[in-house]
């Protein structure tokens, strides 16, 4: 038998921070609402397009640099319906600003106090991130 697939995709930012990406709606819920800590950074492709939830695991009292933010945004775009776009807006906020009201379907959340970063297509950044994938976590 093959071992069970890891629950989330795991990548590493240029600064060495782990970046987790949900594989489906149920994993998006699990990743965002149970796995992520309040200080972790939560990202999702903007414009109401479907896509994976992305979480950057940050140490206490640390914030993500622009490079880490752009790394995570590139993954948010890659694992969404915006894949292949020359540029796409990605919303982000600390995980503590993401809620899930009762009755919402799997994968649906309500973020608040979001900011937006524009991710431009950068094949070199994406290749480095995809090469950093750790399927053992």
Image: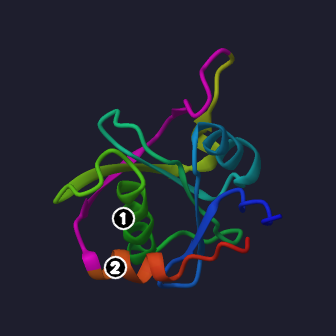
Tell me where residue 97 appears, x and y as whole percent: 58, 41
Seen in the image, is 56 located left or right of residue 70?
right
Which span is picked out in magenta? 103-123
Residue under the image location 71 percent in, 56 percent down: 7
Count of number-bearing discs? 2
| Quarter of the rendering containing residue 83 | bottom left
Secondary structure of the residue carrying numbered label 2: helix
For this rendering, which residue is in front, 7 or 74? 7
Q: Which residue is mark 2?
A: 125
Q: Are marks 1 and 2 in contact (CB under 8 Å)?
A: yes
Q: Which residue is mark 1?
A: 74
Q: Within the magenta stretch, is there residue 106?
A: yes
Distance from Cα at disc 1 to Cα at disc 2: 8 Å
Compared with 67, 22 (above or below) is above
Residue under the image location 78 percent in, 60 percent down: 4
Secondary structure of the residue carrying numbered label 1: helix
Tell me where residue 38 appears, x and y as whole percent: 69, 51
Residue under the image location 49 percent in, 48 percent down: 52
Seen in the image, is 45 located left or right of residue 122?
right
Farthest residue in the left direction?
A: 86
Tell me where residue 73 appears, x and y as whole percent: 39, 61
For this rendering, which residue is in front, 57 or 104? 104
Farthest residue in the top direction?
A: 103
| Quarter of the rendering containing residue 114 | top left
């Amino acid at each position: 038998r093959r071992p069970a697939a890891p629950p989330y995709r795991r990548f590493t930012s240029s600064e060495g921070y782990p970046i987790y990406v949900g594989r489906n709606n149920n994993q998006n819920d699990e990743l965002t609402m149970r796995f992520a800590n309040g200080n972790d950074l939560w990202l999702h492709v903007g414009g109401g397009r479907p896509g994976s939830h992305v979480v950057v695991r940050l140490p206490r009292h640390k914030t993500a640099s622009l490079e880490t933010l752009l790394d995570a945004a590139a993954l948010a775009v890659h694992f969404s319906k915006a894949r292949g776009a020359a540029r796409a807006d990605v919303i982000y906020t600390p995980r503590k600003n993401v809620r899930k009201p009762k009755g919402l379907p799997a994968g649906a959340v309500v973020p608040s106090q979001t900011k937006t970063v524009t991710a431009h297509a950068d094949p070199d950044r994406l290749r480095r991130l995809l090469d950093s994938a750790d399927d053992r976590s």
